[in-house]
Amino acid sequence: MKIQANGKEVVLEKELTVKELLSFQKVEMQDYVTVQINDEFVNRDDFETLLVKDGDVVEFLYFMGGGCMAAERRLV
């Protein structure tokens, strides 16, 4: 079966759960990744049960917070 993962075609021998796919793709910092399948966000509670199916488009996203260097300088 074929899926798209972060814009690249991936061939899988069988359907995998989201958690299995994260490991298969060697995704780092799995506790911090957000997953979208076919433009829908996947609830973290479903990672162990939701199967990725043939033709799915999967995105692994990291949301990082940060600040502005200019703002830090004003505060000092």
Image (cartoon, grey):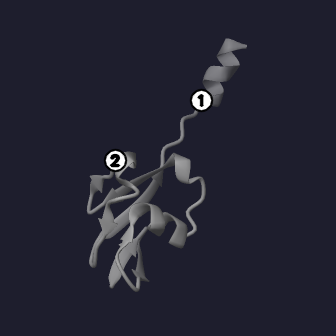
**Which residue was labeled with disc 2?**
43
In the picture, the disc for residue 68 is 1
Q: Is residue 1 above or below residue 19?
A: below
**Mark toward the viewer: 1 or 2:** 2
Q: Would residue 59 appear left or right of 38 to someone viewing this image?
A: right
Q: Residue furthest right?
A: 76
Q: Is residue 65 above or below residue 22?
A: above
Q: CA distance from mark 1 to mark 2?
A: 30 Å
Q: Nearer the viewer, residue 49 or 28?
A: 49
Percent position (x, y) of residue 57?
A: 31, 69
Mark 2: secondary structure: loop
Percent position (x, y) of residue 5?
A: 41, 71
Mark 1: secondary structure: loop
Amino acid residing under circle 2:
Asn
* Total labels drawn: 2
Amino acid residing under circle 1:
Cys
Look at 34% across and 47% down and name the residue there. Answer: 43
Q: Would residue 40 appear left or right of 16 to someone viewing this image?
A: left
Q: Nearer the viewer, residue 57 or 19?
A: 19
Q: Nearer the viewer, residue 19 or 29?
A: 19
Q: Tag 2: Cα neighbours inside 10 Å, few (<14), some, or many (≥20)?
A: few
